[in-house]
């Protein structure tokens, strides 16, 4: 697909930093995996919404895109989720230990791309068919967990590069989700980064290579780890310096966010993060 590409971007934070958090054009986004979009809800052009790929109907995706919203679909690629409709596509031999704290979720063996290929292809096909602009692939950092498989960082790197090729072949942009140790190895293959609790953990600067390459970095912090005043005092100045977008969310990723008057809307050409206008 060949089109003119650009991104209209606006800075917003859930806890309302008073200034744009980026020295360059800001970017406005929300991360709503738990509650999604309300009926009739509208957004300003250039808004970036991260939504559950399965739970979001194609009609909602198309309505959002008609508003000029960029819609990124969340899928887990490192775990098998018992409540999803495609559970039968992952062979039992590739399901490992339970994911602690998440009942019904089990690690998968990312070493076996052939065994997971149909499962991944169907998920990416779904994203493409619904009209999502990109994919937010969760649980690529499972090499740090007790998965039941001898997974290494190199195994995960091979899988993610393979996944990126499959996504790009469908016209989907794809991000790096967490896994700071992999940034230098993946920044040339992926289009943006999504960080969870990176400021809380003191590792936010690890994703700076994405900004150096002109790619967007979306940081999500959680209210069970920091207060709104702490977010304003600590995260906003750091995010501004790093050029990241940052929001504070409830852990259940509902619709909560603070309100901030829109300060600026600018066109931000992104030759590597190709998003439909």
Image (cartoon, rainbow, N blue to C red):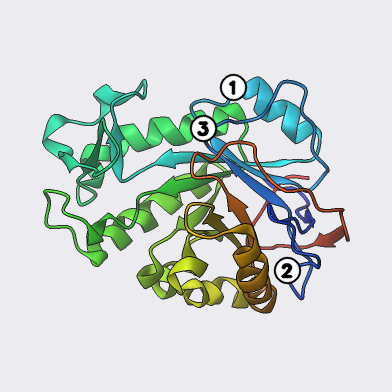
- The answer to which quarter of the image holds residue 92 is top left
Which label's residue is closer to the chain start, 3 or 2?
2
- Dots 1, 3 in contact, CB < 8 A: no
| Separation (CA) of disc 2 from disc 1 | 32 Å
- The answer to which quarter of the image holds residue 37 is top right
Q: Residue at x 36, y 53 (%)?
A: 162
Q: Residue at x 25, y 66 (%)?
A: 154
Q: Position of residue 151 (x, y in %)?
A: 18, 58
Label 1 SS = loop
Residue 216 seen by the camera: no
Q: Nearer the viewer, residue 142 or 130?
A: 142
Say the numbered circle drawn on residue 143: none
Q: Nearer the viewer, residue 272 or 69?
A: 69
Please state, as top left, top right, bottom left or bottom right, where the C terminus lies in the image. Answer: top right
Label 2 SS = loop
Q: Position of residue 179 (x, y in %)?
A: 38, 63
- Dots 3, 2 in contact, CB < 8 A: no
Q: Residue at x 12, y 51 (%)?
A: 149
Residue 83 seen by the camera: yes
Say the numbered circle drawn on residue 53: 3
How would you rate the neighbour count of disc 1 (Cα within 10 Å): few for under 14, some for 14-19, many for 20 or more?
Answer: few
| Residue with the mark numbered 1 | 57
Please state, as top left, top right, bottom left or bottom right, where the N terminus lies in the image. Answer: top right
| Separation (CA) of disc 1 from disc 3 | 8 Å
How would you rate the neighbour count of disc 3 (Cα within 10 Å): few for under 14, some for 14-19, many for 20 or more?
Answer: many
Which label's residue is closer to the chain start, 2 or 1?
2
Determine whether 77 is above or below 270 in the image: above
| Residue with the mark numbered 2 | 21
């Amino acid at each position: 697909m060949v089109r003119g590409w650009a991104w209209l971007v606006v800075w917003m934070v859930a806890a309302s930093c008073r200034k744009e958090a980026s020295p360059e054009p800001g970017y406005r986004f929300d991360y709503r995996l738990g509650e999604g979009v309300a009926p009739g809800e509208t957004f300003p052009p250039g808004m970036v919404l991260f939504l559950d790929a399965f739970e979001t109907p194609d009609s909602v995706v198309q309505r959002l895109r008609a508003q000029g919203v960029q819609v990124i679909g969340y899928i887990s690629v490192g775990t098998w989720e018992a409540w999803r409709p495609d559970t039968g596509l992952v062979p039992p031999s590739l399901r490992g230990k339970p994911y602690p704290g998440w009942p019904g979720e089990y690690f998968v063996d990312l070493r076996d791309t052939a065994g997971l290929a149909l499962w991944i292809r169907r998920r990416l096909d779904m994203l493409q068919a619904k009209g999502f602009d990109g994919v937010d692939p969760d649980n690529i950092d499972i090499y740090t967990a007790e998965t039941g498989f001898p997974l290494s960082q190199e195994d995960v790197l091979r899988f993610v590069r393979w996944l990126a090729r499959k996504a790009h072949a469908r016209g989907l942009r794809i991000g790096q989700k967490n896994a700071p140790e992999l940034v230098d190895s993946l920044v040339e293959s992926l289009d943006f980064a999504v960080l969870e609790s990176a400021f809380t953990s003191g590792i936010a600067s690890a994703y700076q290579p994405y900004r150096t390459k002109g790619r967007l970095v979306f940081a999500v912090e959680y209210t069970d780890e920091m207060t709104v005043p702490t977010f304003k005092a600590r995260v906003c100045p750091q995010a501004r310096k790093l050029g990241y977008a940052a929001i504070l969310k409830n852990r259940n990723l509902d619709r909560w966010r603070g309100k901030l008057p829109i300060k600026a809307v600018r066109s931000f050409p992104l030759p590597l993060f190709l998003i439909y206008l």
